[in-house]
Amino acid sequence: MAFATYPSLNRKTVFVTGGASGIGEQIVRAFAGQKAKVGFVDLDEPRSRSLVEELRGNGADIRCEICDLRDIQALRQAFSALADRLGPAVVLANNAARDDRHSWEDLTPEYYDERMATNLRHMFFAIQAVAPGMIAAGGGSIINIGSNSWWEAGGGFPAYATAKAAVHGLTRTMARDLGDHRIRVNTVVPGWIMTERQKELWATPEALERHRQRQCLPDLIDPVYVARMVVFLASDDAAMCTANNYMVEAGSI
């Protein structure tokens, strides 16, 4: 399949959270393909280093920092290090999350707080870290990755679904707060995306067939399609797009 090239992204600095695998890896690859300067953070050092080595071998200007995003000071330091090497970000893809299953009966306050730290809290502090540089640059684009799990009333992970629902509130309020600086903030809403993790843990034949019946389109969704929506929203082609949801879920709501 042939995808679009966006000249407005050439040599722009892009930061991605959770960039070593899954949807995040495809986002990193997509921006590298646009000849952007890409910095990403992730906790998985072997996969991060491997991805950087591969893309550098293809001519990409790419850096990574190993970081546990639950540690906000570590996140700030990682972004500062990336900015020193690549320049301040004018695009942020707030991608990192984990949809671990958990039952409402056994959910503890400690685990609930950890799920918020893993799936929501770092998104705000990532925005806080990059926004001054975007203001100085005269604008920017922030893309938060949501989920259609709560739109579909999906069960089995109440803390995750709550965090992902809150992403939409974060997007809307920050779009208002940053809009005067020409900083756009949007949410990309994936459906059930066939990452390696999903295939290994939850994509049984029975579950896939049930899900196909919910979708309008018959095909399972590759993570590359989420990445393509992120790239579009980062580009000047989306200059008047902000405070909205952009669905990549094959019509499954």
Image (spheres, grey):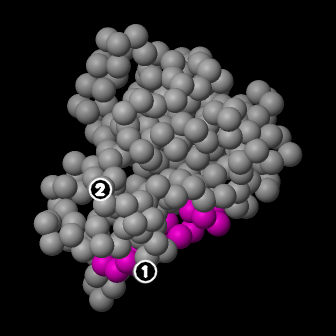
Q: Compare residues 215 and 129 and report the one nearer the observer.
A: 215
> Which residue matches tag 2?
220
Q: Is residue 248 left or right of residue 47?
A: right
Disc 1 crowd rating (10 Å Cα; few below 14, some 14-19, many 20+) is few
Where is residue 49 drawn, in percent x and y? 29, 25
The residue that appears at 29% across and 19% down in the rendered structure is 54
Q: Is residue 196 left or right of residue 5?
A: left
Please indicate, yes or no, whether residue 11 appears anywhere in the rendered image.
yes
Please indicate, yes or no, whether residue 157 appears anywhere in the rendered image.
no
| Rendered view: 192 above or below 182 | below
The residue that appears at 27% across and 49% down in the rendered structure is 195
Give, as a single range, the part of the protein colored magenta. Answer: 154-170
Q: Is residue 24 left or right of residue 238?
A: left
Where is residue 188 drawn, in percent x and y? 53, 53
- Predominant SS of the magenta segment: helix
Residue type of the residue flagged with mark 1: Ala
Q: Compare residues 46 and 190 and report the one nearer the observer.
A: 190
